[in-house]
């Protein structure tokens, strides 16, 4: 479609017949992966680099819609927090459509998080190694939700060259949690990061069923 | 893009749903697939429900895509879509048919699909 964000997407065979937002007729199974991390870490960039549609977003209200109805009189001085949730879509072979949801990592978005995480395969947690402590909140949330995850270190030019061990220790990662470096602007690199997550999910499934 | 131009939503969420805060059915997830039927339109169909039906012209959409295109919160679209399903004007199907949970086979196919993108 004309608004495809990169030549990569425009060149995708599965996207070439799609001119609108509607699902491909072949769509049979819809799955989702959360792309999460602190503000400004590159969630939207990653989604944009791999999505076949221009990433869309929903404006999510952190209070129930009913609050606005019930408290109409108080609406003007009420601060209803709205947060934008970006998402993108990738059609895969065999009728699978993969959705990527860019989910804000802050603790105060817990309810929204739980709603988006429902039925998700897992989460890709983006970490900016220049501010590792900004990722603690989101790692806590992901673990609390019981969502399997992989860590992708989004590389920035001035990233500090920590060793893998140093990073694993400061992020307190389990030994089997994948940790990869990723350039969120690069579709191939982003797909590799997603693959490290999915490969991890397959391995986990094997261990659980045995 | 077929989304409306930027700016404020057509109608605030609480007006779009006619003040209804909870959907009449709880089965609609973000990735539930909505498809319009050719059922006869009642003359008194609320405008917001009609608008939702119109976005389904030409194909199916997930709940979350519908919300993005209508610039409404997902919670409001759940209410509207549930009302349309109740009236037989929309059919909704779950994201993954016949399965409660994604299984290893599905995960493998996702991995294969992602690898194929890199070729």
Image (tube, coloured by chain):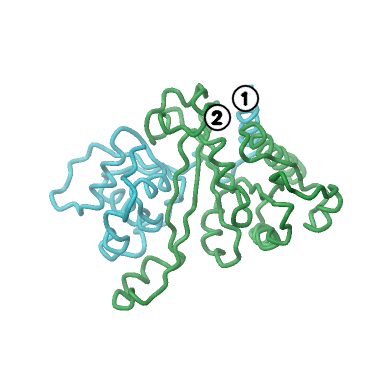
Chain to which mark 2 belongs: A
* Chain identifier matching the green colour in the rendered picture: A
Q: Is residue B3 left or right of A145 when viewed as pictured?
A: left
Specify the quadrant of the image occupied by residue A19: top left
Label 1: how many Cα within 10 Å (few below 14, some 14–19, many 20+): few
B106 or A130: which is nearer to us? A130
Residue identified by numbered label 2: A92
Query: Is mark 2 in CB contact (under 8 Å) with mark 1?
Result: yes
- Quarter holding the C terminus of chain A is top right
Kindly identify the residue that appears in the image at 62 percent across and 31 percent down. B114
The count of marks equals 2
Kindly identify the residue that appears in the image at 34 percent across and 65 percent down. B21
Looking at the picture, how far across and down is residue A8, in whole percent? 55, 27
The answer to whether tags 2 and 1 share a subunit is no
A66 shown above or below A7 = below
Q: Is residue A31 left or right of A135 when viewed as pictured?
A: left
Kindly identify the residue that appears in the image at 74 percent across and 52 percent down. A129
* Chain identifier matching the cyan colour in the rendered picture: B
């Amino acid at each position: 479609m004309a608004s495809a964000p990169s030549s990569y997407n425009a060149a995708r065979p599965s996207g070439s017949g799609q001119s609108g937002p509607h699902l491909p007729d072949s769509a049979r199974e819809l799955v989702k992966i959360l792309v999460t991390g602190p503000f400004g870490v590159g969630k939207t960039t990653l989604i944009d680099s791999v999505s076949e549609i221009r990433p869309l977003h929903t404006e999510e209200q952190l209070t129930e819609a009913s609050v606005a109805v019930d408290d109409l009189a108080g609406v003007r001085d009420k601060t209803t927090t709205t947060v934008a949730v970006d998402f993108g879509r990738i059609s895969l072979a065999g009728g699978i459509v993969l959705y990527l949801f860019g989910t804000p990592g802050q603790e105060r978005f817990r309810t929204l998080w739980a709603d988006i995480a429902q039925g998700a395969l897992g989460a890709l947690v983006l970490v900016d190694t220049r501010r590792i402590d900004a990722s603690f909140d989101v790692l806590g949330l992901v673990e609390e939700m019981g969502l399997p995850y992989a860590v992708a270190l989004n590389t920035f030019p001035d990233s500090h060259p920590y060793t893998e061990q140093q990073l694993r220790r400061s992020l307190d990662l389990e030994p089997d949690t994948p940790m990869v470096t990723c350039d969120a602007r690069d579709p191939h690199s982003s797909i590799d990061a997603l693959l490290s997550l999915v490969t991890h999910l397959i391995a986990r499934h094997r261990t659980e069923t045995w | 893009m077929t989304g409306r131009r930027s700016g404020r939503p057509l109608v605030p969420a609480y007006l779009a749903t006619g003040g209804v805060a909870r959907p009449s059915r709880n089965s609609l997830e973000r990735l539930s697939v909505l498809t319009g039927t050719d059922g006869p339109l009642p003359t008194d169909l609320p405008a917001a429900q009609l608008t939702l039906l119109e976005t389904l012209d030409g194909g199916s959409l997930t709940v979350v895509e519908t919300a993005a295109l209508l610039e409404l919160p997902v919670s409001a679209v759940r209410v509207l879509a549930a009302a349309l399903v109740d009236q037989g004007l929309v059919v909704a199907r779950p994201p993954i048919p016949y399965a409660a949970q994604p299984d290893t086979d599905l995960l493998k196919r996702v991995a294969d699909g992602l690898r194929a993108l890199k070729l």
